[in-house]
Image (spheres, coloured by chain):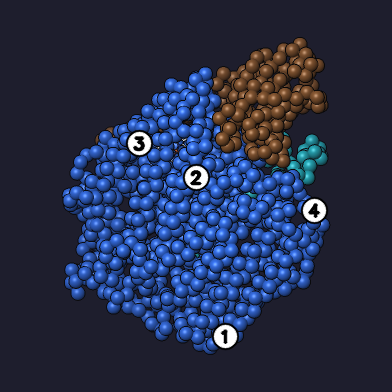
Amino acid sequence: MNTLARHRRLTRIWSSEPGWKGWFSTVNHNDVGRMFLVTSFFYFVVAGVLAMLIRAQLATPHSAFVGPEIYNQLFTMHGTIMMFLFAIPTFEGLAIYLLPKMLGTRDLAYPRLTAYGYWCYFFGGGMLVFSMLAGIAPDGGWFMYPPLTSKLYSPGINTDFWLIGITFVEISAICAAVEFTVSILKYRAPGMSLSKMPIFAWYALVTSLMILTGFPPLILGSVLLELERAFGFPFFQVDLGGDSLLWQHLFWLFGHPEVYIIFLPAAGVISTILPVMSSTTLLGYRWVVAAAVGLAFLSFGLWVHHMFTTGIPHMGLAFFSAASTLVAVPTGIQVFAWIGTIWKGKPQLKLPMLHILGFFLTFVIGGLTGVMVAVVPFDWQVHDTAFVTAHLHYVLFGGFVFPILAGIYYWLPLMTGRKRFFRLGEIAFALIFVGFHVTFLAMHWVGLLGQRRRISTYAPEDGWTTINLISSVGGFILAFGLALVLVEVALQVVTRHRTKRNFWNSGSLEWAMMMPPPAYTFASLPQVKDRDPLWHERLLPVQIARGEGYLGDPVGDRRESMTVEIATGAPDFHLIYPTNTRLPIFFSAVTGLFFLSMLVKLYWFAPIALVGMAAVAWRWVWVLGQKEDLGPQPVGRGLQLSNAAEVDRSPGWWGSLFLLVANATFFGSLLFGFAFLWTVAPGWPPPVFIEPSLLAVAIGVGSGVLAAIGTFAAIRSNRRGASPTFGLLLALAGALGVAATFVFTILRMPNPTEHAYGATMLVMGSYGLFHAIVVLLMVSFLFARMRAGFLSAARRAEPAIVNLWALYLAAITTLILVAINLPGLVA
Amino acid sequence: MEPAGPAANTIATLWWVMLAGATAIFVLVTVLLALGFRSKEAAGDEKRQERSWIIGLGLLFPSTVLLALLGYGLWVGERLLPRDGPDLVQVQAEGRRWEWIFGYGDLPAVRTLNVLHIPAGRPVDVAITTSDVIHSFWVPRLAGKLDAIPGHVNVLRIEASQPGTYEGRSAEYSGVGYDHHGFTVIAHDAAGWQNFLESGR
Amino acid sequence: MTSVLSILVSPLLWLALFSGIYGLQGLSCELDLDTTTFAGISAARALLGAAWLAAIALQATLLAALHAGRFSPEGAFVRWISRATGWTGLVATIWTLFPVAVTSTCG
Ligand code: HEM
Ligand SMILES: [Cu+2]
Ligand SMILES: [Cu+2]
């Protein structure tokens, strides 16, 4: 096959359906990545317009532009959209688009999941946009503190839009995080060991692990608050044994890591671009990797610094103040590694580099004011003033928007295959830089003068008039600069000004393909020998295109790829991707029905939607797999690998593992909530405890263990070529036993609306019951698969996945039953 | 930022120290960045660069500065904690949308709305709580802020050096009336304070 | 997977110890341990101080294990990163928990 024929053939196999209809069925990362980016920048514009309205309102004292009712919606939606609908999805879009190309592979681990995540984002974001257009947008501030957001003080549907819409959108973040983690660990070009991985992939890996552990507390908080609003479960009502501080802990347990979830990908962009702009390599690669890992962990020990004024004892505050200063050290390592890189190389002031300089000057100030507010007494003074608003914009705009703009200008030639024609970018940069600093330096100042955040107006006597006017003027200059960027990007997409390959002379694999990238990315997968393959093997792009790498000769219509072992990068197994399908959009629509029924209070419909989701999920996994043994598959260069269906640890196993990590964090947060209420909430201990039942504990734990043992037995007999029926029956019985135990336990619980204790117990019991049902469904699925002939001694991937979930069920069942029965025993 | 009491004073000093330090660090970073753009010889030994940039400037330099700052901050924080003293005055503040109700020690008859009376020159402990949503008690010129949280009582130490009137604000967003949610603190001299306690006005 | 775990284990341990000691501090205030004193040291401070020292010892042991013997991970790169994060865990345990020795416990 010659190069052109290969290109045609692969294009036909990997392309999405032609025309706009293709958007609904595409699962290709090239498409979905761009869809994410376009949507997220749409939200950037929306939130930017809201910011302009805010600044217009604050420009003059006694402003009558909007009243507080509208103003409260404006800043809440500005903050919410920027954080949840712009920053995180921009990272997702960029990583979806770039990761497979940088890692030297053809797609991410779960293409349909990529698309599902996008549609959840699309529909969830749509809910929030609808609320805004209808004038019933959330108005409790982006951190939504109860009791202000409880039913009593916010009776309208506004708050529900936030809780439900954002949770819906977060599904997409969790999907993306699972997908990135598995893709980075397993889906790389052969030979790319961990030490040869592009630095952006390290950052994306760390960020993904942070999303998996950072988002669940917020999801839990949102679920609890929505349960309180919908059914009167008093988690946050102090007179019924709840405590509003629980929300603050759950929110900031998410909220602080969130800031680093936003910053780290941007730091990855800088670590990628800066060396290329300086014609050198990154100084201290391994230091930067270690710093990113350290930063990620430390950022989970900072959350209380958002609660310095809530009356926590000084030693408690001191722990978090200490951690908040320590976190500046790994940040310092990265900053100086970057400056050292500039010194090491020959920096050139091209447009992406300008934005990187903008990043440095802005982010360093944001970091310094961040250290200031980490000092407890100073925070007591400036907390909840415009100083903090200014600080957070220095961090977020400096640490995210500038790097992302650098990234856009850097990768746009790759994405479009064209180069800039009009030189608007330099002017735009100047406007953005000047506008930004005018706006937010002024806000630091007025904050020190005592201007609180979130006020819709002030009086001339306050003496803030001039500063606010300056700040607003700066804001409009900034907005004008950003608009110019958008114009320029749009122009670059439409003008025909072709550019050469590897535009910036980078060493990284995303530049080893045609521009714009073909649907299949690599015509054959390269063997990677070092960290900058393109610098050391000039002919690599040609060799790839000629099919001299792996998987250069497509078989039938298969979308084929392969994985590697995590540490060494040695080839692991062969796999076949699913192709274009509408299942993702359909699945997310059904998911949306569930959220919608919660939103409009059609509670009877919610279970129906859940059953619908289960049915679609069944279909989702059913279409995968093989009905006969494939045996070793040739992948080119004389190598043969097993197919993904014929290994112990398949993609589904890896995905389940990391999904369970997120799930376990959710469960851990729930246990934390229980312990927190117990020790801190004033209304404890509750009037009655659940009557402890050792029998229930014994049956429940025994059944959980039985379910796990059953799946082990099924794996073993299947492996020996025997029928796994007996093991599956055991597992089925075990899952049923667990489910029955939880039903029995829930029936004996005190009324959940009378005390937060009962409400917490009910949530725990339901969590256990839900997992029992999931395992029940999974085991039934295995039965059906066995009968339909999908299992064999070789095709053994699926039982291993169910085994993972059964083990998890056994573990949580034990913990839940102890948590439910122990207090009654002790009391 | 015109501090008028010991707590606010200490915090203001803290701010000026930090501002000076931050400016110095910012200038340092900017200069290093600018110098990076000089045209220069081929780079030297990478190990050496790693040591000076990353271990020296990235690791040791921030660690030293931050440890010093942390120690200073904790020391200030300890000093600002409410501790028992001979001439301590106890008052209560209860926030609700959108006003503040103040009570005085064990004088149930004396209650004031949106005006807090205190003696000047004596430490005052304000016991803060709320009867609806979260608020925050803040008199910028006297001390930092402390939240009013349902079901909890938090104690903030304030002190006005001189008699006078000080503006107080509620500093936690509380809904539509938030803009104007504030109060006034009147610090009396010794005679005026006695007079207030007796007349209850 | 073991390589990834060896990179993560020390900071994970720090996170557990940090949260644990923060919880212990809340509990000891709840139980009024700060008002019982022996020889000028409150029971709360003694308890927290002991927990802190134990935490440091634990991190140091882990770091030693990463440096030598059976638990030292394979591959120069992963080994280096694991040791760096091992040091991070140790330093973080000392740095973020040293307030147990100096600040007032429940005030
Ligand atoms: C485009 C330029 C931007 C301008 C002019 C701007 C302006 C503002 C202003 C004036 C406020 C204060 C509202 C108030 O306290 O009353 C605010 C709040 C906020 N902004 Fe921005 N902003 C911009 C970009 C961003 C970006 C890029 C992000 C995040 C990625 C962001 C996140 C936030 C958040 C989280 C809040 C707090 C909202 C709340 O108090 O609930 N902003 N912004
Ligand atoms: Cu934070
Ligand atoms: Cu910050």
Q: Quadrant of ligand 1?
A: top left
Mark 1 touching mark 2, by CB under 8 A? no
Label located before the other in sequence (2 or 3): 2
Label located before the other in sequence (2 or 4): 2
Quadrant of the image containing the N terminus of chain B: top right
User: Label 2 vs label 3: CA separation?
Assistant: 23 Å
Residue linked to disc 4: A687
> Compared with residue A311, is residue A690 higher up or lower down, i.e. above or below?
below
Residue linked to disc 3: A479
Badge 3 residue CB within 8 Å of ligand 1: yes
Q: In the drawing, what numbered circle is on residue A725?
A: 1
Label located before the other in sequence (4 or 1): 4
SS class of the residue under badge 3?
helix
Q: Position of residue C107 (x, y in %)?
A: 72, 35
Label located before the other in sequence (4 or 3): 3
Q: In the drawing, what numbered circle is on residue A137?
A: 2
Callouts 2 and 4 on one subunit: yes
Chain A's colour? blue
Chain B's colour? brown
User: Label 4 vs label 3: CA separation?
Assistant: 57 Å
Callouts 4 and 1 on one subunit: yes
